[in-house]
Image (tube, grey):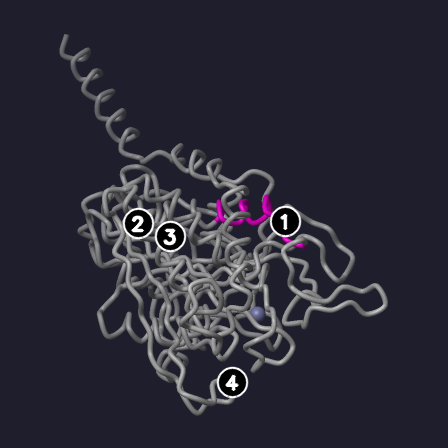
Amino acid sequence: MYRKTAFIFTCVFTTSLAAGVPPSEDLRLYDIAQQSSAKRIKADIEKLVGFGTRHSLSETESGSQGIGAARRWIRDQFEAISEACGNCLEVMMIGDTIDGERRIPDPTEIISVIAIQRGIHDPNRMVMMSGDIDSRISDPLNFTDTSPGANDNASGMAGVIEAARLLTQYQFSGSVVYAALAGEEQGLWGGKIVAAHAIENGWNIDAVLNNDMIGNIAGINGVIDNHSARIFSEGVRAAETKEDAALRYKTGGEVDSASRNLARYVKKTGEQYVSNLDLMMIYRLDRFGRGGHHRPFNEAGFPAIRIMEVNEHYDRQHQDLRNEDGRHFGDTIDFVDFDFAAKLTALNAVSLAALAWAPAPPSDVSIKGMVYHSTTLSWAPGSDANLAGYRIYWRSTTSPEWTNSRYVGNVSTFTLQNIVIDNYFFGVASVATNGNESPVVFPGPAGAF
Ligand SMILES: [Zn+2]
């Protein structure tokens, strides 16, 4: 009798430990991915192209043409989406007057449109999806001629609006921010202004997913590919101090900035939940010598990545509309693949949802194990309402992505027995009771979120 009781007790104990490991998938993310609509994205790109030009120096008074009409239409879309979810969005215009710059010679208002869907547990922790409002043709100062900017970047902008439609059907722990950034082609001004606003207002942005050209599947290299996309991310963080650099030089972290681990997170989440999508990690800030709106966020210290097509077509970027001996030039809507734009919008939506359903990434992550048989990671205990525990990750130093992990429960330090610190890179992620995880945080200032 006594032995039997003891046996039952052991069973219960074992079961409760197993039940404590959160699920490995969140089925809601499959639904979100499948709802992304090519039809709605097409309608929004058509509308944006219909403003004639969205050049930053263009007309602002007209109701139908120019940058002013374009940004007011985007604001109206966010307002309409908000109305449909019981006013779940805070919609705001964030801008400044820029003057005396190479591409903005005269005083010009650069106004971005931002919509915030507040989280229920941690409303100041934010994950952002961004696209650009503005367009350009061959001469960066030509603000009057037709400049459709259908792929660059009405596609990214339409993706942001569609993601807002999809995600406002749900409530999240953290906040989701939908950003229509202005003045990209004139020198990344909207991103700079919004990043500065975020710092001034203490916004805790853990992720910026910047989308710039997500609708072209036919490259100038002759490749046609509707199932791949690129994720660009900084290696060493732009905001690194001299002291942090000295520490990183000795202990590693040059391929483990928060932005890089955000990129790994988006790759893993996208390939899990979005069908027929292969994500190509590019270990570089951006295309060679070129720019995008994730950079000003990196420079302000926020984790930020660029998402885009793999095979660009340069005849259809920043070109006057024309035909030269049968060769088409210009960023017109007939070359946009709406299904592909919907697929990359789904990638953003599932990544934002997973991030916003997860607890905050662990903070104050440290590691020790020098001249020892085991490696110990420690971090500050989290206080998130939805926190289940933590998962430790490690990989070979030459592996581009995390290969090994184990759940360690709700503790703030853990020792991996007989795993020697010198031979691997390590990190830790927070795990929600619903299974969603934060990005992996590499120890020390090199990887901190
Ligand atoms: Zn461009």
Amino acid type, residue under disc 3 in the picture: Gln
Q: Which residues are magenta?
A: 335-347
Query: In front: 346, or 269?
Result: 346
Relative to 185, residue 79 above or below: above
Up/down of 443 relative to 407, above or below: below
Quadrant for residue 431, please give it. Answer: top left
Q: CA distance from mark 4 to mark 1?
A: 31 Å
Residue found at x 42% / y 64%: 63
The tag earlier along the polypeptide, 4 or 1, is 4
Closer to the N terminus: mark 1 or mark 3?
Answer: 3
Main SS of residues in magenta: helix
Rendering coords of residue 210 (x, y %): 46, 62
- Residue 314 position, x and y percent, is 70, 67
Tell which circle, 2 or 3, labels the residue nearer the N-terminal end. Answer: 3
Q: Residue 260 appears at what percent x and percent y?
A: 47, 62
260 versus 83 height, above or below: below
Is residue 249 found left or right of 358 in the rendered image? right
In whole angstroms, how far apart are the C-alphas of marks 4 and 3?
29 Å
Quadrant (top left/top right/bottom left/bottom right) for the C terminus: bottom left
Labels 1, 2: front one: 1
